[in-house]
Structures are given as structure tokens and as C-alpha cells.
Image: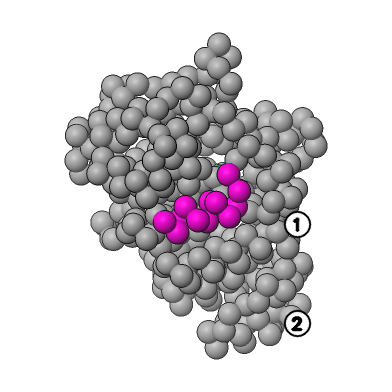
Amino acid sequence: MFSDSFLEKIFDKVKRGERVTFDEGVRLFETEDLIGLGYIADFVNRKKNGNIVYFNINRHINPTNLCINKCQFCAFYRNSLDEPGAYEMSVEQIIKTLKPEVENGCKEVHIVGGLHPEWKFEDYLAIIRGIKENFPELHIKAFTCVEFDHFSRISGLSIEEVIDKLKEAGLGSVPGGGAEVFSQRVRRILCRNKISGERWLEIAEKIHQKGLKSNATMLYGHIETYEERIDHLDRLRKLQDKTGGFNAFIPLSYHPENTELEKRLNIKGSTGIDDLKVIAVSRIFLDNFKHIKAYWVMLGKKLAQTALWFGANDLDGTVVEETVTYMAGYKTERKATIPEIVNLIKTAKRKPVERDTLYNTIREY
Ligand code: V47
């Protein structure tokens, strides 16, 4: 049935509910039998999620792109307000932006941004408070582990205190960004000023201990090896065994345009085959994650739809005006309408379900 006989062994294993090992994970990336790999991932996904594919109605807000981290893969950040494209949003501007979205059914705001050189923790808290006061029903999914660490440094508070204050202000859950690839080798080249992989995981654990759910991501398609990808997934799998606090895993396909990494190392980004492999291997390896998102903003809508046959069960959301990928050259697709997402799911022969951030069903199509 499989052109790569190794896949027979893996298929038997997953049918018995056994865990794929580190070495087997690496070997899965090496297979040339893409269809066989997708078949196994699809089997694993259908066992967990049946025929359902989720999406949500959300809006991204990136309050500022001023950032002290200067990550080499990022086209979004600016050093100071004098630079072209640099910006910061006031709380009033954020509220004004969200108002028509909420009136049109938006259920979630996804907030991530730069580590602003001057903003205080209070400024970030004011954003959450302002949104909660104006839109009490809106779920606020905000700030990555990287931002939590920054808030702790600039305020002198512990991570636990930072989490408590954000929860009090109205934070509902935490997005999965900033994880990149946990390997120290990769981080030294990509993002030497950013917190370590260990610190990211330590903060995610504390977030879960405080009762908040979070997501996890992996930025791939640059300098990382297959071993480094599996190391990343393995560390996430171990933490999920411990806390059960991750909702979804989201592979993020690297977009090189306008980044230092492209200029320095001439990196071209991933290919369609690799994008599908990452979705499929993540689905097979992360046996304790219920949801794998095919993030259409980075994959493109057509490949994200195809990924629904390679283990993904979530297309993320209507998104609207995501800026991180847009600045890195992906200019064609900045928002998706509900009929468009429903059509992508239906023509993939799956059942579209609008969900809230925590995967409760809002509407079946
Ligand atoms: O942390 C930055 C990545 C992340 C580039 O939790 C890039 O539901 C590709 O985390 N090419 C932010 N990727 C986005 C993110 C996310 C997105 C969707 C859903 C969720 C969720 C989280 O984007 C950053 C970084 O890893 N990134 N620059 C780039 N040039």
C-alpha cells in the first residue's frame, strides 16, 4: 500500500495507538511517499476529530511594530518611529478598529506585537482592559511567552504575577508565537536576543498552571534540520503530557522577503511539499494535541485547503489584516470571508464548524 515500506510500520503503530519515537519522526520527514504520509496523518486526524474542520471569526491587532528583539526572520519590526512603516496604536485606535468587527460577529481578537522600547507593562494592560470594557463578550487571545517574559523584566513582577494581572484585565488565552525553533543553534542565528526555547516552555507551563490555555507554533523553512524540527515537537509533546494546556499546534511557513535572514543567507522559504510534510508529521507525532491548524495566511488558501487531507483540522479564522506575514512579502491574501472559508472546507468534503477560541461549537454549516 505504501511505496516506502517504513510507513507500513508507522501505520501499524498509530493504529495500535502507539507513540512515534524521535528517530521515527526524523525518518518520516525523509520519506518521499508524500501521499502515504498524508494518508497516515489523515487517519490520525479523523480518529481524533472525525469529519469536522474548524474555523473562527477573528481579527488580528498588532499594536506596535517597534521591537527591541530584532529577529533576523522578521520583516515586521522597526527600531524607531522615524523609520518608514513604523507605528504604534493607541487604545482608542484599537477600540475603534475593533468596533465594526465585533458588530459583524467577530468573536476573538488575536493580539501580538513588538517589544516596544518604551512602553510599560501598564500600557499593555491598558490595551486588554480597554478592549474588555468596550467588548465584554469578545475573547482576548493575546501576547506570546516572549512578551510575558518582557513584561516581567520591565515591571519587576514574576511571571506568575504578570499572568494574574493580565487575567484580571481580561485575558482569555495565549497565542502560540515566539516559539520559532527551540534549538539553541537555530536561535543564535535567527533570534539571538529572544528568550531561549527552555524559557518559552517554562513560561507556557506557568500559563497552563494558572488555568489558561495556549497554542504552540513552529517557524520552519529556513535553516533548521529535520532533527531540530522533531526536537521542537518532542519538547512540546513532553510539556503537553505534563499540563494538557495546549489547544492547537500551528506550523508557520517562513516567508523570507524583506528580512535580514534573506539578505544574509539568501534563504528561499519552504516548498508546498515541505509545507504538507510538516502538517502531516506534526499530526502523527503530536499524539496528545487535538488540533493542528493549517494557517492559510502563511500557506495560502489553496494549500491550506489541501492540508485538510494531510492531518489539519482547523483553518484558523477570517483573520483580517494580519501584518507579520504581509510585511514579509505575502501580499495577496490578507483576509478571508466566512463563505470563502466554508467553501474551502466543503469542497474538501469536510464539515465546516465555526468555533470559539476554546473549540466550543458556535455554528455548524
Ligand atoms: O512568532 C514572524 C512568525 C509568529 C515571519 O496561536 C513569521 O492561534 C513566517 O504566532 N514568516 C506570529 N512567519 C504569528 C503566530 C500565530 C499565527 C496564527 C495563529 C496563532 C495562534 C499564532 O509569526 C511569530 C513568528 O514565529 N513570523 N516573521 C515570517 N517572515
> How many badges with numbers are in the image?
2
Q: Is residue 52 left or right of residue 128?
A: right
Residue appearing at x 30%, y 42% in the figure: 165
Residue appearing at x 44%, y 74% in the figure: 48
Q: Is residue 309 left or right of residue 270?
A: left
Task: Give residue 332's position: percent from left, percent from top.
Answer: 56, 33
Read off the residue under disc 2: 5
Determine which quarter of the picture holds residue 62: top left
Task: Give residue 261's position: percent from left, percent from top.
Answer: 73, 35
Read off the residue under disc 1: 225
In this view, 64 is above or below 306: above
For the N terminus, give its image quadrant: bottom right
For the C terminus, give its image quadrant: bottom left
Q: Residues within 10 Å of mark 2 (few under 14, many from 20)?
A: few
Q: Residues within 10 Å of mark 1 (few under 14, many from 20)?
A: some
Based on the picture, tell me whether residue 62 belongs to the magenta stretch: no
Q: Is residue 200 left or right of residue 111?
A: right
Residues marked 2 and 1 touching at CB (< 8 Å): no
Quarter of the render that holds ligand 1: top right
Residue appearing at x 70%, y 59% in the figure: 228
Q: Which residue occupies the foreground of this view, 222 or 116?
A: 116
Q: Nearer the viewer, mark 2 or mark 1?
A: 1
Residue appearing at x 19%, y 34% in the figure: 133
Numbered disc 1: secondary structure: loop
Numbered disc 2: secondary structure: loop
| Magenta residue span | 195-206
Determine which quarter of the picture holds residue 130: top left
Residue kind at label 1, given as amino acid type: Thr
